[in-house]
Image (cartoon, helix red, strand yellow):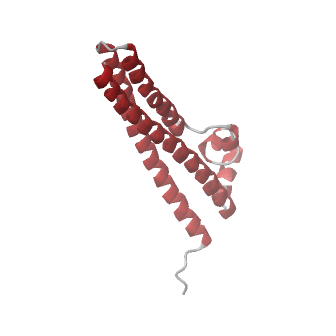
Amino acid sequence: MDDQPTPTSAVEAEIASLEVQLSRVDTKAAFLFGFTGVSIIGGSALVNSLDLRPLGSTMALVSILPLVASAVFLVLAVRPVLGKSVSESSGFPHYAVLPFDDLAQAVEESRDPRARCLYLANLSRLAVTKFRRIRVAVDLILTGIGLSVLSCLVIASFG
């Protein structure tokens, strides 16, 4: 007897793995969003509470801009995708618009190996989009941190 997984079980294993990864990336995005929010609020409060010269104030405010941009990318990363192309393919958005009589047939068809492969492909595209947005957000956070350090040096040197 051959112990090789069937194509169907291999697809199901990939789907399960991808769903776990998507869950983890949403948790990471939530953590990063919290960090970014605290950094924006804390940085803004600090800038407003100090009596800075225009150069120091401008540098500090500029260092906050990449953090605001990263927050936007993080929100986009966790934003639900409920567009027309998704609702036409599978899952609850598709089932929500089906007449009751067609629902059982659609659920049954979604178990077809070709439909599961299509679902895996759609899920993979969603994951790549999420990971790219989070990667950009992390790059922006790092830029904001670098600019914050530079701002601190400018403020310490010139006020």
Give x and y (percent) for residue 32: 40, 38
Please report the residue visible at 67 percent of the width from the left and 42 percent of the height from the top. 87
Please report the residue visible at 44 percent of the width from the left and 30 percent of the height from the top. 67
- The answer to which of 8 and 126 lies nearer the viewer is 126
8 left or right of 47? Answer: right
Choose top left, top right, bottom left or bottom right for residue 60: top left
Give x and y (percent) for residue 14: 54, 62
152 left or right of 111? Answer: left
Count every numbered label the image shows and give the total.
0
Please report the residue visible at 34 percent of the width from the left and 18 percent of the height from the top. 47
**For residue 77, above or below residue 57:** below
**For residue 42, above or below residue 107:** above
Q: Is residue 66 visible?
A: yes
Q: Which corner quadrant holds the N terminus?
A: bottom right
- The answer to which of 125 and 118 lies nearer the viewer is 125
Q: Is residue 111 visible?
A: no
Give x and y (percent) for residue 97: 68, 38
Give x and y (percent) for residue 101: 70, 45
62 left or right of 12? Answer: left
**For residue 22, above or below residue 5:** above
